[in-house]
Image (cartoon, rainbow, N blue to C red):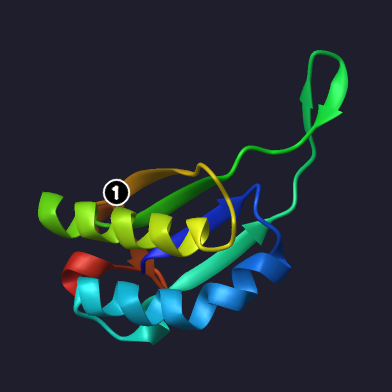
């Protein structure tokens, strides 16, 4: 955790920045790089009856770390993505609660 689900950015693009991105995000979150998952979804969007480019959008699923950390995380993530030549990207956070997250059938708040 955190888990980043990326769409509208190719796996080739994401792989170019993945190492430096995860290293910076780990510093911000004060956790190891092995806590991160990056998933790149290749989807086909449709608009107005035509195939269209998928808008760059990143969903971050994590345990809440506070507004300051969230702001720093979003800013760092955006800087790395924009360095690829992507003009605009949106980031949204999905927050898990420890009592609603299970690892091997055991709630995280009991681990």
The total number of labels drawn is 1
Horizontal relation, residue 45 to residue 3: left or right: right
Image quadrant holding the N terminus, namely bottom left
Q: Nearer the viewer, residue 38 or 105?
A: 38
> Residue at label 1?
95
In the image, what residue occupies the spot 59% across and 64% down? 39
Q: Where 80 falls versus 23 (above or below)? A: above
Residue pictured at 58% horizontal, 51% vertical = 86
Q: Residue furthest right?
A: 50
Quarter of the figure with the C terminus: bottom left
The percent position of residue 77, horizontal first and vertical second, equals 39, 60
- Residue 95 vs residue 43, the one in the foreground: 43
Q: Is residue 32 above or below residue 110?
A: below
Picture quadrant of residue 26: bottom left
Mark 1: which secondary structure?
strand
The reply, left or right, for residue 33 in relation to residue 73 is right
- What residue is rendered at 12% in x and 55% in y? 68
Query: Is 87 or 61 nearer to us in this picture?
Result: 87
Binning the other alpha carbons within 10 Å of mark 1 as few (below 14), some (14 to 19) or many (20 upward) gives few
In this orientation, does residue 65 appear? Answer: no
Locate residue 41: give its quadrant.
bottom right
Residue at image point 29% right, 53% down: 100
Q: Is residue 96 visible?
A: yes
Give residue 17's position: percent from left, percent from top: 54, 74
Q: Is residue 106 left or right of residue 104?
A: left
Spot occupied by residue 55 in the image (x, y as percentages of width and height):
62, 37
């Amino acid at each position: 955790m955190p888990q980043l689900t990326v769409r509208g950015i190719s796996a080739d693009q994401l792989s170019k920045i993945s190492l430096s991105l995860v290293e910076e995000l780990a510093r911000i979150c004060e956790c190891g790089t092995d806590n991160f998952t990056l998933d790149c979804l290749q989807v086909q969007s449709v608009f107005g009856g035509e195939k269209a480019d998928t808008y760059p959008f990143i969903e971050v699923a994590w345990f809440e770390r506070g507004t300051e950390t969230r702001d720093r995380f979003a800013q760092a993530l955006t800087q790395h993505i924009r360095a690829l030549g992507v003009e605009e990207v949106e980031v949204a956070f999905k927050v898990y609660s420890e009592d609603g997250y299970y690892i091997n059938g055991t709630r995280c708040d009991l681990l």
